[in-house]
Image (cartoon, helix red, strand yellow):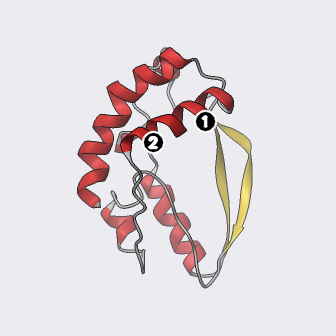
Amino acid sequence: VLTEKQHEEAARNEYNFDHPDAFDFELVAKTLVRLKEGKKVEVPIYNFVTHSREVRTKTMYGANVIIFEGILAFYSPDVLKLLDMKVFVDTDSDERLVRRLQRDIAERERELDGVLKQYFKFVKPAFDYYIAPSM
């Protein structure tokens, strides 16, 4: 959940959504534990246009196989302990940029300049620092 200051930074493309501090790893771990126990969970839905959680949630149920994915899926030691198997799918950095541009402009109503600014200031450095070492 972003503070008012963080919302303002996000509106200017100056908030680092790719930093581990932007993620609620405690909630992720609790959710994975409940799913692994076969229990039902209510997962927050994040709105990328408004930069906030929606009121509604997504109901998920525990299963024999749970696929958990995300850019920092291997970052948290507490989350890593809960994973029985890990698969990392890498994509060429140029392809990652093209996909981000297409997604952010088409689905998240973002401007080209803002997406590029955020990519080079936060996304690429975060990949190099936090994600690449876990590959």
Q: Is disc 1 placed on a helix, strand or loop?
A: helix
Q: Nearer the viewer, residue 98 or 23?
A: 98
Residue 87 placement, left or right of 65: left
Q: Residue 106 appears at what percent x and percent y?
A: 67, 30
**What residue is disc 1 on?**
103
Picture residue at 54% right of the left edge, 19% below the top: 112
Residue 14 in view, yes or no = no
The alpha-carbon separation of the residues under discs 1 and 2 comes to 10 Å
Count of marks overlaid on the render: 2
In the displayed structure, 64 sits above or below 130; it is below
Q: Quadrant of the image for the C terminus?
A: bottom left
- Image quadrant where residue 107 sits: top right
Which mark, by number, is residue 37? Answer: none
Q: Residue 97 appears at what percent x and percent y?
A: 45, 35
Q: Is disc 2 placed on a helix, strand or loop?
A: helix
Kind of residue at badge 1: Arg
In the displayed structure, 32 sits above or below 101; it is below
Q: Residue 36 appears at what percent x and percent y?
A: 55, 79
Q: Residue 77 appears at what percent x and percent y?
A: 30, 64
Q: Nearer the viewer, residue 116 or 122?
A: 116
Picture residue at 70% right of the left edge, 66% below the top: 60
Picture residue at 51% right of the left edge, 31% below the top: 2
* Dot 2 alpha-carbon crowd within 10 angstroms: few under 14, some 14 to 19, many 20 or more: few
Picture residue at 31% right of the left edge, 40% below the top: 126
Is there CB contact under 8 Å for labels 1 and 2?
Answer: no
In the displayed structure, 115 sits above or below 41; it is above
Residue 61 placement, left or right of 69: right
User: Could you tell which of marks 1 and 2 lies nearer the N-terminus?
Assistant: 2
Kind of residue at badge 2: Arg
**What residue is disc 2 on?**
96
- Image quadrant where residue 58 sits: bottom right
Q: Nearer the viewer, residue 52 or 125?
A: 125
